Image (cartoon, rainbow, N blue to C red):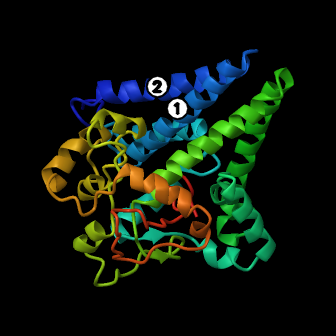
Amino acid sequence: MRMMRQKDGLLPNLLALSYATAGFVIGWVLFFSTSWFINATGIFILAHAMVIAAYLIHECAHNTIFMKNNWNANLGRYLMWLTGSSYSEYEAIRNKHFRHHVDRADVVSFNYREKLAQYTLLVKLIKWLEWLYIPAVDILMHSLVVILPFTMANRRHKRLHVLTVVIIRAAIFLSLASIKPVVLLYYAIAYMLFMHVMRFMDVHQHTYEIFETLDQPRGELPENFTPEYETQNTYSNLISEKFPWLNLLVLNFGYHNAHHEKPITPWYKLPEVHRQYFNDDERQLLPFRNLIKAYHQYRVPRILNADLEDSPYPGKGRHFIGVDGVSFLVTH
């Protein structure tokens, strides 16, 4: 049995994995320089290394890298440490993403909007932080991965895993801070940049209905949740059509309709699938420049609002509110 799922998969995946690992290490090393310019460079390198690592986790979840599923799982667990998502369990990430594809919906444990709306002061604080471009919703959603095992009975079995990761990461951060305390601030900035990139790619890719059924066995899907429904409520958000190589900055994750058409396609073959199925059809392709404007314009309304299913988007995405809190790295 060969090692790689795809015969041509060794080089592209090795390059991506090497970049993510080297970028993570180099970013941290640059934090300890006495030059603020080098420190800033380290912030951007680390943030982008985490982006690539995150999308490699997505590849592992689809088992597109290795022939053996447990090899994909072990690589995914390693990458989760790089992205700061190691508080979750790999199988929980994979299960949630599997439900997203099979159910053709955003499947969650609970709809945070309904619960968050009950806390007026917290909503005001989050709105103020989001106005300042601090990704407060994402910080909250990632924090709940640590909190929920101690507040929800059906997640009590995750407590030991969460505590173990908290202790290990705290020890690492304290050791680094003992050398140069400001490196924790640099990491926080890098992590927020990472969150913004991940969220920008996520918020505009679906107008799916949200179902609070993640912790329940799969039931029957509504009759209208057909492959046509999936395509109509899925959007591709390429960084550039003119210069396709720029899409490699997010491992081609912007070819989202192609990914949903052929979920087991590896990241480096998605442009080919896009050309095959959607090359002459731009109805689901939203221009990057319009989405940047929409991401900025609706950053505060998006906290408690989202788009309706089958929504038309005048101006090709200019009025796309998007949806927060659907990262595949969050397991609730």
Q: Quadrant of residue 302?
A: bottom right
The quadrant of the rendering that contains the C terminus is bottom right
The x, y position of residue 83, in whole percent, is: 58, 40
Q: Residue furthest right?
A: 178
Residue lying at the far top in this picture: please name it: 34
Q: Amino acid under label 2?
A: Tyr
Label 1 sits on a secondary structure element that is helix
Specify whether 43 is left or right of 247.
right
Label placed on residue 19: 2
Q: Quadrant of residue 313?
A: bottom left
Query: Under tag 2, what secondary structure?
Result: helix
Q: Residues within 10 Å of mark 2 (few under 14, many from 20)?
A: some
> Which of the marked residues, 1 or 2, is nearer the chain's N terminus?
2
Q: Check the image and report above or below for 183 versus 100.
A: above
- Residue drawn at x 54%, y 25% as measured from the top left: 23
Can you tell which mark lies on residue 28? none
Q: Position of residue 134 (x, y in %)?
A: 68, 51
Image marks 1 and 2: residues in contact by CB distance under 8 Å: yes
Count of marks placed on residues: 2
The answer, for residue 193, to whether it is visible in the render is: yes
Q: Position of residue 277 (x, y in %)?
A: 15, 55
Residue drawn at x 33%, y 74% is: 312
- Three-letter code, disc 1: Ala
Residue at 18% over, 55% down: 278
Q: Pick the quarter of the image with the N terminus.
A: top left
Q: CA distance from mark 1 to mark 2?
A: 7 Å
Whether residue 74 is visible to the viewer of this picture, yes or no, is no
Number of residues whose C-alpha sits closer than 10 Å to that of mark 1, classed few (under 14), some (14–19) or many (20 or more): many
Residue located at (40% from left, 72% from top): 208
Residue at the spot of label 1: 49
Establish if 205 lies above or below 196. Answer: below
Q: Position of residue 287 (x, y in %)?
A: 34, 53
